[in-house]
Image (cartoon, rainbow, N blue to C red):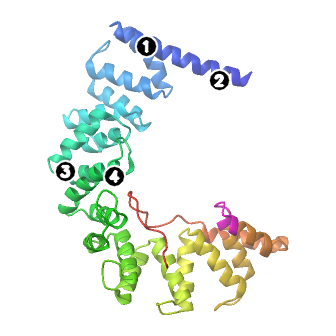
Amino acid sequence: MIIAACVAGTVAVYADYGAGVAAYKEGDYVRALTVFSPLAEAGDARAQFALGLLFDNGEGTPRDDAAAFAWYRKSAAQGFAKAQYNLALMCEARRAVCADSARDWFARAALRGNADAVTRLRGYASAGDVEAALQLGRMYTQGRGVARDPRAAYAWFEQAATAGHADAAFALGVLHEQGVGVAQSYAEAARWYARAAEQGQVQAQFNLARLYRLGRGVAADQVRARTLYEAAAEAGLVSAQLSLAMLFEAGRSWPQDPALALSWYQRAARGGSVDAQINLAFIYAEGRGVERDLIEACALLHVASERQTALARDNHAVLCADLDPAARRLVDRRAEHYRGETVGQAARVPARSRADTG
């Protein structure tokens, strides 16, 4: 009966909204206002947009820019693209005090496939707006709001990178390295990564470090690679912390240093890296270069297993099954130490940002 009532309520909402649309099309704006108002108050994004439109145009009610903006804003916050587009128009015309720029609202609407917003965003980019060009590059790379088009993505990224945008330069490096939208070239990838890295773009520092370590597109240089890895790791990029830990642990074409490996594993594990949590658990379980600590190992595996990692779950079952209740409570307390959020988020374009010691 409860389910039936919910379904009936949903049908009623759609019916009421449809009645409002019908009234609007017939020019009965007062009736439309009457229908849309309670729906908008109840949180219906479509009705909020419709109510904003009535206030915007002065239909069925005196024109009221403040009311129009407020209802558009409520609808836009729920991701309704038409409301986001109309907010952008109001911001562009300076009909409202906007915390976000018109360009930003056009970009949000464009991401949701609003064709008019895409056109507006292109206009901003063509006029030299670097952020708009970067956004278009990301959209064409990911196929969000537009059809995926790597060549178009490259062109927009190049425009933004030439104007000095570090994230765009990083994106060009990725496209050259992967041969997407442009001929594959490690040398060109390194050149663009270097431009971004010089501006402190941590993903570019990480990717360039790998190229220097492997000698791809640049002469192999382990000293330069280490400097770049450490810069990205110190900035909080967890994948760089994990890479350093694995490199110092393995010591293949890299100085072996168990103490540094342990330190970087600890930082990456606290940053949320499941791989670091599992590897560090093995180190504590076996007492490799550190005093054996089964409680710490189980805490690490417990947190890693929460991420649906089979390897962590299996090892947790083997190592930690026989812990007494007091030990389990201690494991739970220590596990909190490793439940932080990852620092240093990846840029919003495809990238080889995982730890790579191959």
CA–CA distance between discs 4 and 3? 15 Å
Looking at the image, tell me whether mark 2 or mark 1 is earlier in sequence order: 2
Q: Position of residue 253 (x, y in %)?
A: 46, 90
Q: Which residue is mark 1?
A: 20
Quarter containing the N terminus: top right
Q: What residue range appears in magenta?
A: 304-311
Q: Is residue 224 left or right of residue 41?
A: left
Residue 8 part of the magenta-drawn span: no
Query: Gap between marks 2 and 1, in whole Å?
Result: 21 Å
Task: Please tell me whether residue 135 is drawn above or below residue 1 in the rendered image.
Answer: below
The residue under label 2 is 6
* Residue receiving disc 3: 129
Are circles 4 and 2 on residues that touch, CB within 8 Å? no
Q: Are marks 1 and 3 in contact (CB under 8 Å)?
A: no
Q: In screen coordinates, is 156 left or right of 205? A: left
The residue type indicated by label 4 comes to Arg
Q: In front of the other: label 1 or label 3?
A: 3
**Label 4: element kind:** helix
